[in-house]
Amino acid sequence: LEAETCRRLIAWEDEKYYNSTGTQPMPNRRDTMEALSLSVLFKTLDDLDESLAGMEEWLSDKAAAIKPLTDDCREVEEENRQLGFQRNSYGLISKELKRLLSGLDVPQDVEKILKDPTYKLAYHQNGNIDVIKSQDGVEDIYLAGRALKDAFDIVQKEGGVHLRGVKDRVERLLSLSNSFCDKVARTIVQVMEFTVTEVASDDYDYAASNNGAIGKFIRNTQRKFQSSLLAYVQLNEVLALLKPSKLPAIREEYSQIVSEGVLTKKRMKAYFASLPGKSSVNMTSYTSDLKEYSVIALRSNIPIEPGTAHMKPVEAKDIDTALSELLPVIAREAYFTAALFGLSAKHLSGREKKRNFESAKKSVDYSTQYFKYYISRICGIASEADAEGKKVEADPMLSLVASIHLNEAMDGYIDRQKKGGDHSLSLAYVRATILDLRKKVDKQWVAWVEEQIKWIHTNHGVPLNGKRAGIFLSFARFPSYLDHVMICIKAGRPADQIPNLSKIKVVAYYIQKMAAALFKSLHECSERETTDQQYAANVMRMENSYFFTQTIKQRGSELAELFQKQITAASSICKQSTDSYLGFMIKKEFKPLHTLFANISRIRREVGDADVPIHVPRSTFEKTLTKECSREILKEKIGLIYYRLEKHLSETGGLLPVAWKALVKVLYEWFGRWEKLSAQCYKFTLEPSASDVVRIAKQAAGVSAKKINDERRKSGYSAGNKKLDEMRRSAYFK
């Protein structure tokens, strides 16, 4: 500070000198006047320093003198400040305690109800609750519980439980709440027990009633019981607010009361026993293995080999009736259970809704256990021996029909309006019940299908060399099984309400799987090493594939739509095999002609029409035609082809007319092509012509058929075989 002051004073003196003389002072030039001025400045500064030092010394002496007084004042001020803070804190605590404790007080009349809620209820002289008169006191009990819940909400919202006064008051309220909830829970159970004894009297005459009357009685009993309990729903709401842990035990009690008092075993047994088909009493088996069905001939409605399978229709009407009359009862029970215990509130999260649904399902499952037991019996679901020693054997055919009826029943319980709440929960429960039954019946039928597929792959009755194998037994019996399926499905239905099997995924998949197993078996037999590959493999393929296609188409559009893919594949197999087989037959009988014209066709492509006679002389050409293509020789060879066709093809398959027609067409095409080659290369007219060959083939087929009939007649066929046919017919109709 001093150095800066000196520099400024010097600069000021230089400025004064410049203003007085008008010249710029030289650097480092100082005269006597300037030095004198600086001396005065330094002296002034020294005096200032001495004055300041003296002042500091005086202040120090005074501060030391008053130090005891300032220390005393500081301690007093700190104590006063702390006392002020303490006063403010106590004031705030007082206000907070008043606010907290004021919310924990319940009125005396409410506290009286909380201590003994039963005094608001009416009782009979025998000590039982008067359900009708007690309904007026339910509202008071609910409001008392609500007031107690509001007090707990205040504590939870405002806090302060760590304070002794609040804690003591809360513990007292908790003790009061536990006692109140225990008494309310006992009251609810007593009301349910007394109600079921009042409305569910068991003096109904089941033996004199049909299933419709018994079903109506069950629905009315359920409706009365639930209507009586509606006024007490608020008691469950109080428990849900104060002590939700009490509700599961009450649900179990409710389920047991419903199972033993409303949907009882006696009522369910009487209802199912009264169904028209008596299917729960007369446990008839409708299922036969595929090998037990009749062998079907393609061009005959009478089986050529009657089987042991029973083609009786199942009692599907019982299943449909039971589902239509009792599923609404189950849906109502699920709806009321959800409403009574508050299991379907819309504000709940997805996880909570799922947990509540499982709780409701467990409760309703127990309530409706006897319905499930008897509906399983009439659906053919296998079961262990019950208390009475009765055991249900699995019936896959009945299970198949039951699966279709259950699938149709599902459509009536889809929540299309998305209402949510109790309505959606009840529909979801019914769907879950139906799905559970469908899983069981589908599992039984699918297991049966897998067993039949194993039998199909044994290739029963197919010779090792494949010759004259005819229609496989699995192919021949499969249409009979489909007939039985359609008989059972159509039983008890109007003609315009036949279900579309192709729309039912499980049924369609496994029936198609059986058909696929048939063709897999056919492929294995035709490709094995021991099978004759010249013609037997092709005959095997075309006969069985044609038989499958025609038998399915003959049985209506429903099955044709179901097996559309298999029919397409079978038609392709039949066409390829037929072409190969007919080509083999023609080449075998017309080998010289085929070799001649194949050689001419090859040479013609290489050198042209004009040079063909050079490579194949005309004399050789005419000699071969004279030897192999005369009218008599053609008649003989075509007749021989027809004879071999009759020998190779079985009567069961019905393929001979179709195969012969295809052969005639091929002959016409081949001879037409040969006729054209003869005219172009040799200017030779082939005799007989292609049209003549067709006429010869038709005559040969007629002559050959007549000859075979004559041989059969001579061998006693008309007597012995006719008698055998009559025996087969009588056995089938019997």
Image (cartoon, rainbow, N blue to C red):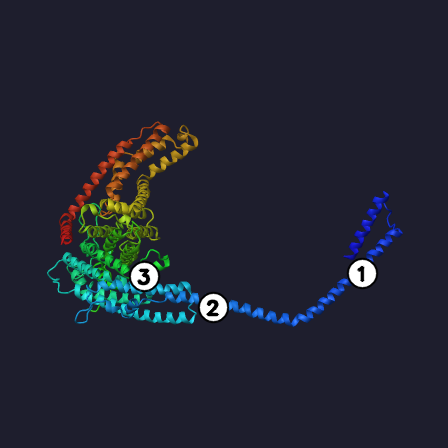
* Secondary element type, mark 1: helix
Q: For the residue marked with disc 2, what is the amino acid?
A: Tyr
- Is residue 45 found left or right of 305 in the rendered image? right
Label 1 or label 2, whichever lies nearer to me, is 1
Specify whether residue 55 is in view.
Answer: yes
Residue that badge 3 annotates: 358
Residue that badge 2 annotates: 90
Specify whether residue 391 is in view.
Answer: no
Closer-to-camera residue (159/598):
159
Q: For the residue marked with disc 1, what is the amino acid?
A: Asp
Q: Residues within 10 Å of mark 1 (few under 14, many from 20)?
A: few
- Residue 631: % across, % down: 26, 34
State the CA–CA distance, disc 3 to disc 1: 101 Å
Q: Please report whichever mark, 3 or 1, sits nearer to the chain's N-terminal start.
A: 1
Quadrant assignment, res 367: bottom left
Residue at image point 34% right, 48% down:
533
Label 3 or label 1, whichever lies nearer to me, is 1
Residue 645's mark? Answer: none
Residue at image point 31% right, 66% down:
107
Q: Please report whichever mark, 3 or 2, sits nearer to the chain's N-terminal start.
A: 2
Of the 4 image quadrants, the one containing the C terminus is bottom left
Closer-to-camera residue (132/608):
132
- Residue 645: % across, % down: 26, 44
Residue that badge 1 annotates: 46
